[in-house]
Image (cartoon, rainbow, N blue to C red):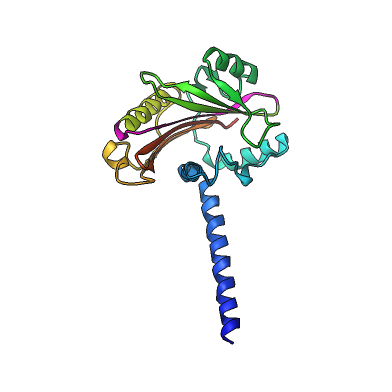
Amino acid sequence: MRGARWIKWSALGITVSVLSFVAIVGVAHTPWGRPLLGYLSFLGMNGMNSGCPIGAELDPARAAELRAASLEPLRGATPSVSRRVLGFELGTSRRDEVLTWSRDQGLECSPPPRQPNSSDLRCTGLQLRGTDTRGSVNFSFDPEDRLLDVERAVRVGDAGLATELGSELEVEIAQNSGALSSRHGELTAGYLSRGPLSQSAAEFRFEDMRAQVIVTNMGDGAFSIRGIHQSLL
């Protein structure tokens, strides 16, 4: 009887653990859960270094269909002033243009890890304005090689610098595309320094694009700054 009870509770514990892990991974792949995804990557549990099973390669047409369905609820009511980022136009600029630009910038670009056949690019060595800090920039494309998404990312070791870089990205988006739609958390050094996963997330929603600036305390004195642009056309 005791053995059967132990097996029952062990099975229940395993089930709860699996469901908890699935829930965490699920949340990490939602728009506001991206900082958690980055944190798992930082710990070597997921992301660009190890590859995410959810990010396994799909047929390009199917991937585009899933992407459109997931982003549709995030569409704003008015069009953006401009969909430009890094000199490119979302939905218009082509992969060849991005490759030419990346060579001119001295960046090293390659398909995402564990997706060698993808047309998407992950470029490293991007220098931020006014600093010696270098980060990465990811580009994704539709089946016709038109630019869909741009994601810039960098990590720094100072909350004040993280705040400044996040503010610069927010100003850039506001000037190019339009006004801020919502914010979660505060973009201040004091707020971000409260502890790991303290976060400021600014969102800009438009009819034809969506942009985010997410600044996250990754722990151990590291702060992640991410600027994300997504075409909605």
Residue lying furthest bottom = 1
Identified at 61% across, 32% down, the residue is 112
Identified at 32% across, 41% down, the residue is 192
Quadrant position of the C terminus in the picture: top right
Quadrant position of the N terminus in the picture: bottom right
Of residues 105 and 96, the one nearer the viewer is 105
Above or below, 125 against 220 in this view is above
Residue lying furthest top = 104
Q: Residue 84, percent across and down?
A: 51, 21
Q: Residue 186, percent across and down?
A: 32, 40
User: In the rendered picture of this protein, how many numbered marks are placed on residues?
Assistant: 0
- Give the quadrant of residue 108: top right
Above or below, 85 against 7 in this view is above
- Give the quadrant of residue 170: top left
Identified at 55% across, 75% down, the residue is 9
Q: In this view, does 113 lie to the left or right of 200?
A: right
Q: Residue 99, percent across and down?
A: 61, 18
Q: Residue 34, percent across and down?
A: 49, 42
Residue lying furthest left = 190
Q: In this view, does 145 lie to the left or right of 37?
A: right
Q: Is residue 142 left or right of residue 102?
A: right
| Range drawn in magenta | 144-160
- Give the quadrant of residue 55: top right
203 part of magenta stretch: no
